[in-house]
Amino acid sequence: MRRGFPNVGKGWRVDADQERYFILDDTTLEKTGFCMEGISRVFDHVAQKSVLGYKLLMLAITDKKSTIPVDFSLHAEAGRKKDFGLTRKQLKERFCKKRDFNDCSRNREDELLLEKPKAAIEMLRSAVKNGFIAKYLLADKWFFGKDFIHEVRNIRKGLIHIVTLLKKKDTNFLVNGKKVSAKVLISLHERKGDFISCRRYKSMYVRIRAEYDGIPVQLFIIRYGKSSKYEVMVTTDMKLNFVSAFELYQIRWNIEVLFFETKQHLELGRCQSTDLDAQIADCTLAFIAYSVI
C-alpha cells in the first residue's frame, strides 16, 4: 500500500461474496512533554477539552465480525492563532529533524498539517487501488462536506456509498427544485406530523429524497425516544430504507472498539520519543499486532 500494512489482510481484498465496510474516524493520542516533533494541543471530543498530543486518523475495514486497520496518519492542530496552542518557548523546544526530499518519512511530516478529510481521501484511494473493496464508507459527522462527498463518489465511478450524519443543520439541500436547509425541513415535517415510528430502534423518522451539490442523497431526520433533539442521517445510496441505514451506521462503533483495545492492551500512543518517525513506528506496530491477534 501507499504506507501502513502492505501484507496485512490479504484475505480482505476483492471478494464478491462478502460485503465489507470502510470506517473512518479519529482518536486522540495524549502525550506529555513539549519537545516532541510536531506536537500541538488537539481537541479531545471525549474529554471536551484541548490536550497535548496528536490526532490519529484511521481508515479501517470490517465485515461486522472482524475489523482490520488499513491505513492511518498523525495530525497536529494549528488552531486559530496558528501557534499550535503552545507558547513561543514551547514551540522553539519542539524537536526538529532534517529529512531528505526523497525520504519517505517526509510525507509523514507533511501529513501533520494536512487537512484530515484530504488525508482520508488519499487513504481511501490507496486502499481501493490495492484491492480493498467495500460498498459503504461509514464516517463521523465532521467529515461531511461537498468536496469530501464528491471525492468519495468519484472513486471507481461511484463504487463507494457514504453513510454519515449531518454536521450543521443550516446546510442546504435541493428538495423538489427548491433549496432548503435541514433545519427548515425538520420544522416543516414536525409541523405536518410526517414522522414514522420505528419500534425496533425506539425512534421517529422521516425520509426525504434530495440533492446535495448535484449528488442525489437520502436524508433521514431522526428523533430518538423522548428526546426533543433531531439528528439528520445522510446517505448517497438511494435504495436504503431507514432500518438498513441505521444499522449500517451502527457498524461504525467497531472502530471505537479497535481504538479502545489497541490503547488498553497494545499500548497505542504510549511512545514518548521526540522523533515523529518513532511515533509512526509505535502506531504501526500496535496495529500490526492487533491484526495478527
Image (cartoon, rainbow, N blue to C red):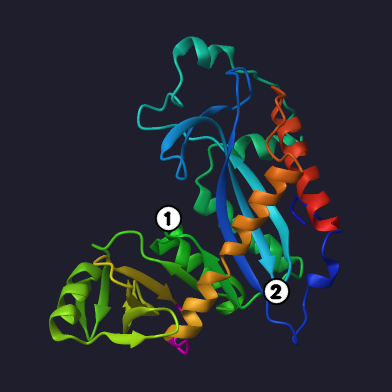
Q: Is residue 94 visible?
A: yes
Snapshot quadrant of residue 176: bottom left
User: At which x and y percent is residue 225?
Assistant: 33, 73
Residue shown at 49% from the left, 9% from the top: 89
Q: Is residue 32 left or right of residue 238?
A: right
- Disc 2 crowd, CA 10 A, few/some/many (<14, 14-19, 20+): some
| Residue 197 rendering spot, x and y as whole percentages | 32, 86
Task: Answer with left or right where residue 191 lies relative to residue 150.
Answer: left
* Tag 2 residue: 63
Q: Which residue is mark 1?
A: 142
Q: Which is more N-terminal, label 2 or label 1?
A: 2
Residue depicted at 77% across the width and 45% down the height = 286
SS for dot 1: helix
Residue at the far left: name it: 191
Q: Is residue 104 visible?
A: no
Q: Secondary structure at mark 2?
A: loop
**Residue 292 locus on image (x, y percent):** 86, 56
Q: Which image quadrant is residue 108 in? A: top right
- Quadrant position of the N terminus in the picture: bottom right
Q: Amino acid at mark 2?
A: Asp
Q: Which residues are magenta?
A: 236-241
The question of residue 86 being in magenta is answered with: no
- Residue 113 left/right relative to 173: right
